[in-house]
Amino acid sequence: MDINNKLYQPISPIEQKAVSNSDMESISNKHLLKMQSRHTIRDFSDKNVSYSVIKNCIKVACSAPSGANLQPWHFVAISNPSIKSQIRKAAEIEEQKFYNDIKKDEWLKALEPFGTHSDKPHLEVAPWLIVIFSERYGQLADGTKRKNYYVPESVGIATGFLISALHLSGLSCLTHTPNPMGFLSKICNRPPSDKASLILAVGHSAKDAKIPLASTVKKPFNEVVSVF
């Protein structure tokens, strides 16, 4: 630590209640089982979801760690049917280009087991869309650009927090990344510093919702983890 650093002000963290080893085992196992029940779904109910729930979940996302704590993200929560319709129309134009591009044959073949296509009704049916933007740079009060650090990593962690919070609140979601996504900046009225990362469709799953069998196949634990 640099003792001459006048900006560093150490404080005590928020106190976390001590948990016994046995309780930790129980808590972590319950959390594992709950998170293992999470699935990406494409078939949504139009059942209303309170903004207060969405707000709390976004607050969880905003608690994520980030490079130099610069929090290089912006969340746009949309329930307005007209705006959702605009997003669907623009997204489907890009999706149609993607699915008609023979240069992407290998990618399209990889998607076949998941039954995806250019029609995206979930963008209108789901009660909420959360568009997540990466803030490529910040701006000081005098208009000077301020560099942000580890932007993709920070936004990725925050997005993971958000998806977990939504699931633990009883909601389902679908990550959607039309390419390119420049239209989202215009529809969501974001500045040039912001770049859309993804659209998250959020709501309750439809009663007849189905998921692709291929999505349930996860790599074995020992294939993705090394312990030393």
Image: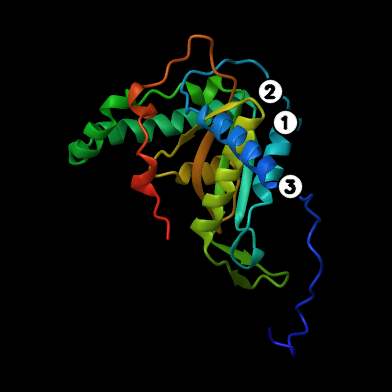
Q: Residue 176 appears in which quarter of the rendering?
A: top left
Q: Tag 1: Cα neighbours inside 10 Å, few (<14), some, or many (≥20)?
A: some
Locate the C terminus and report the quarter of the image it occupies: bottom left
Q: Tag 2: Cα neighbours inside 10 Å, few (<14), some, or many (≥20)?
A: some
Disc 3: which residue:
19
Is the C-beta separation of discs 2 and 1 under 8 Å?
yes
- What x and y, as percent, mark residue 209? 47, 14
Query: Which element carries disc 2, helix, strand or loop?
Result: loop
Question: Which amino acid does the dot numbered 3 rest on?
Answer: Val
218 or 161, which is in the foreground? 218
Return the residue found at the far front: 22
Disc 1: which residue:
53
Q: Residue at coordinates 64% horizontally, 46% vertically from top-left?
A: 61
Disc 2: which residue:
49
Q: Residue 34 appears in which quarter of the rendering?
A: top right
73 or 173, which is in the foreground? 173
